[in-house]
Image (spheres, rainbow, N blue to C red):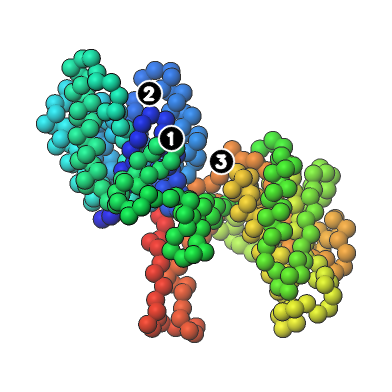
Amino acid sequence: MSNNNILITGGSRSGKTRHALDCAAPFTGVKYYLATAEPLDDEMKDRVERHQKERGPEWTTWEEPLKASDSIRKLSEDASVIILDCITLWLNNLLMQGEDEASIRIKVQELIDACNQAACPVIIITNEIGGGIIPDNAMSRQFRDIAGITNQTLARAFSKVVHLVSGIPVTIKPQATSAPDENKADETPHAFPQTKKNGVYEAIYKRRDMRHFLPDPIDPAVLGRILDAAHHAGSVGFMQPWNFIVIDDPEVKKKVARNFSQANEAASKNYSGEKKDLYQSLKLEGITASPINLCVTCDSERNGPHVLGRNSISETDQFSACCAVQNLWLAARAEGIAVGWVSILSPDQLKKDLDLPEHVFPIAYLCIGHTESFYKKPMLEEKGWAKRLALKQLVYYNQWLGRPGNFKVVLPPPSK
């Protein structure tokens, strides 16, 4: 049973849907967008298609104009979060089907029960329609009254209610002692504001190792921001051992593609039977398809033979370069740019093809470009190659296989 249900209300074009998506951003796994609108004309069809594209491929749209309660019960079985958009259209649909006020109140209570019993959080969007001119006909006045009463009923039942005013979310339940500030950090003096935290976690959870690219060119300024993020990675002794070789020459790409083909053929011999068939079916690179390739290197001689913190563990220069790769990857995901790491390569051949000095080692060869859509899950998980390990099985205390004592980490529920 979820106790994290949210009711989002506000006027037309006040930013309700955008805020609902922001609230759902930290969740991973299956996300359902329960739409009550019926695309009965071209204008509504265009609007529905536009909104689906804006939501992105991680959202599965489920259209149900009438039986919202049944849909929530069904979808919550495998969902990490559900957005219902919106109550106002749902009420209109019920009225058009001949439902009266008494039967609608029963259905509203059924909806509340379904939300309370759902195994995942449910975010419901509704509209405030009672602030304007009193309608001039009985049916419109009846609709306005039913919508207002329904909103009151939902607001009493939900643990959190947010009112959107000109794109600004104002939490009206639970009531704050002072006006809430979405830009104010919480928990500790150094924590990011919640909206910024959501962005960081969203980039982490939605990062994907991509293999499918569009030929569209990358904006040089966007790539510059991504490289600057990589350059701000942490490094042992502040040695900053990385260099970034930007590759757009088709001939260089062809050399690297040949390197991959040879290494991939050798790697396939490690498997047999169904595993080999699956391996050979996987797309494991996008070298020639992506507009930009990027080689992140590690200069082991930067800052001389004695780098602060590296004498004990010499490989920390390579570890540092890997931190730059992760920064680059997350920044690229935030920019909507796809990145794929090609690890099936001969490092020695790659050094020759890129004319790298002896002391410079290629850490990562990356394919970078736009994509039609990001994978909902890691590709190898989607294809059945491997599954994500349960985090609780990987956390020990004080020693290998150690059990918790007085302190035990509270882990989030596993993503579905």
Q: Which residue is mark 1?
A: 166
SS label for mark 1 = loop
Rounded to the nearest whole Å, what is the CA distance between mark 3 and mark 1?
A: 30 Å
Label 1 amino acid? Ser
Rounded to the nearest whole Å, what is the CA distance between mark 3 and mark 2?
A: 24 Å
Q: Quadrant of residue 40?
A: top left
SS label for mark 2 = loop
Q: Which residue is mark 2?
A: 39
Residue found 60% across the figure and 49% down from its top: 333
Q: Nearer the viewer, residue 76 or 252?
A: 76
Q: Is residue 28 above or below residue 369?
A: below
Give the mark nearest the N terminus, 3 or 1: 1
Label 3 amino acid? Ser
Of the two numbered discs 3 and 2 in the rendering, the one whose residue sits closer to the viewer:
2
Q: Which residue is mark 3?
A: 373
Q: Nearer the viewer, residue 213 or 107?
A: 107
Label 2 amino acid? Pro
Q: Is residue 122 visible?
A: no
Badge 1: how crowded within 10 Å, few (<14), some, or many (20+)?
few
Q: Is residue 258 above or below residue 9?
A: below
Farthest residue, direction top: 136
